Image (cartoon, helix red, strand yellow):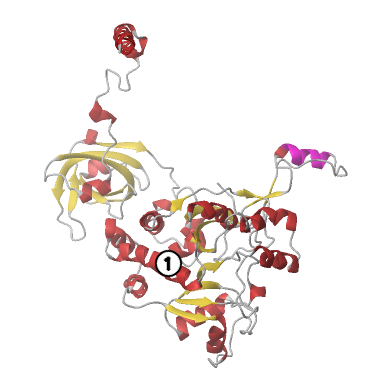
Amino acid sequence: MKCLQLLQSRILGSCGRSRAHSPLKNYNRLSSTTTNSQAVLQKDLKSLFSNPPLENSFVQTQGWIRSVRSMKKIAFVDLSDGTTFNSIMIVTSPEIAKDLQTGSSIMAKGSWVKSKGKNQLYELSVTKPEDLQVIGNVEENYPLQKKFHTAEFIRSLPTLKFHTSKLSTVMRSRSFMEYKLQEFFQSENFIKVNPPLITGSDCEGAGELFQVESASVVAKKLANPQDKQITPFFGKNSYLTVSTQLHLEILAQSLSKVWALSPCFRAEASDTNRHLSEFWMLEAEIAFVDKVDQLTWFSERMIKHVINGILTNENGALDNLLKNSKRSKEELLEIENRLKVLQDNNKNWYQITYNEAMDLLLSSGKNDWKYLPPVRGSSLSTEHEKYLTNEVLKAPVFVTDYPKDEKAFYMKINPDNETVACYDLLFPVMGELIGGSVRESNYDVLLKEIERRQMSLPDLQWYLNLRKNGSVPHGGFGMGFERLVSFVCNIDNIKDAIPLSRSIDNCDC
């Protein structure tokens, strides 16, 4: 007891001396000229519209000018800061607004008043020149003027394109959908993990890989092309991942339910509206799963959770999609209707087998296929998938039990030995959104399949060994996140669903 009291007295004495003489007192987080209120971030427009200040109160805001309209006695400056689809109209004099340009960033201070306009509740009245200051000017040839621009033209401006209402809407929608997915997995007791992006194996067996090597090793190989003894940086050939699934299976064998949202990479030499070389994949792996129905049921609930959040206008998500996005009334109605079809909780989506899908396609009487007609035993093309969902079923559909030779090596083989326990979720307009399967959990069966396909056993031995030491049945799925964003936002080109797209001959900034 005496020892404890002595120790406490020494600590207190030391602390007292430290406070009295410590040079650290000069290093407070806030300087003598900075107050707590000055250190707080300025209120953004979304905050101002969500919790409006009292009428006629003095408000400061900042953002980028969308347009300037000057009349004889009054001027209107449309200001946006990107946090919401709403912009604030600054009402001022032509004299104060005379040097303002579209695209410039400004700070404005004025009275928060009710708007006399039809499409907004509030506006900011600025009466003093010093209360409207330019933060950053634009060049004379600033390309995003208030006029129609084609999607191709906007896409050519990667550093400016998010000033457009359509693409800023897409980015806010993307952010909300990611938030709802995280919320869903959290509610289902999943653990979010971060699997590696560099791998020594090709998960899908597609062969379209980006090889990873250090600059020094590449230089050595170029200088000595005949030297076969130069060791790769990782000790073996390594690649950017096309899927994190194999590594998620490691984690699921210990954590039961895991998911990831990670970038993936494919070196496809295609520059179409459906191809990206870098894209984001949502992938989940679940232990103690042995039926495809468990996975399709879970996938449907996951998507409906996201759609329900949008349709209930949570956090203004539906308003963000449907208001101020420069779309026609018909297009906006199409977006809302397609979301309602997906969200209907009283109706499950269709689920059919691959053979049933083939029966529907082959009996449809359609002969004018743009590309190849459907052939039983071969994969469904995007054209076939869209025809099933757009014309035949007019709804989302899970297609299960594909021929094993058309799918990946790791899928569990069905008792018929011809098909595998897998599924694709097909969406109207989009085609495939999700692909998943029960994984083969039998060591000997998986080994036989790897050998039958003449795959590299040394590269996959670690994966094969997961079937030992307490292995359990498991399954999972992957979803291209940009595909979901494209569907919800009604985007024709997937390059507009990701902030800065990467594809062949395209890596500008």
Residue 218 x, y percent position in the rendering: 75, 41
Q: Nearer the viewer, residue 118 or 221?
A: 221
Label 1: how many residues lie within 10 Å, few (<14), some (14-19) or many (20+)? few
The magenta stretch is 216-223
110 sits to left or right of 418: left
- The reply to whether the magenta stretch includes residue 222 is yes
Query: Can the viewer see residue 307 in this picture?
Result: yes
Q: Nearer the viewer, residue 477 or 286?
A: 286
Residue 193 x, y percent position in the rendering: 49, 49
Q: Nearer the viewer, residue 70 or 399?
A: 399
Q: Main secondary structure of the magenta part?
A: helix
The residue that appears at 50% across and 71% down in the rendered structure is: 291
Q: How many marks?
A: 1
Residue 299 x, y percent position in the rendering: 44, 67
Q: Which residue is mark 1?
A: 298
The residue that appears at 55% across and 93% down in the rendered structure is: 365
Query: Can the viewer see residue 152 in this picture?
Result: no
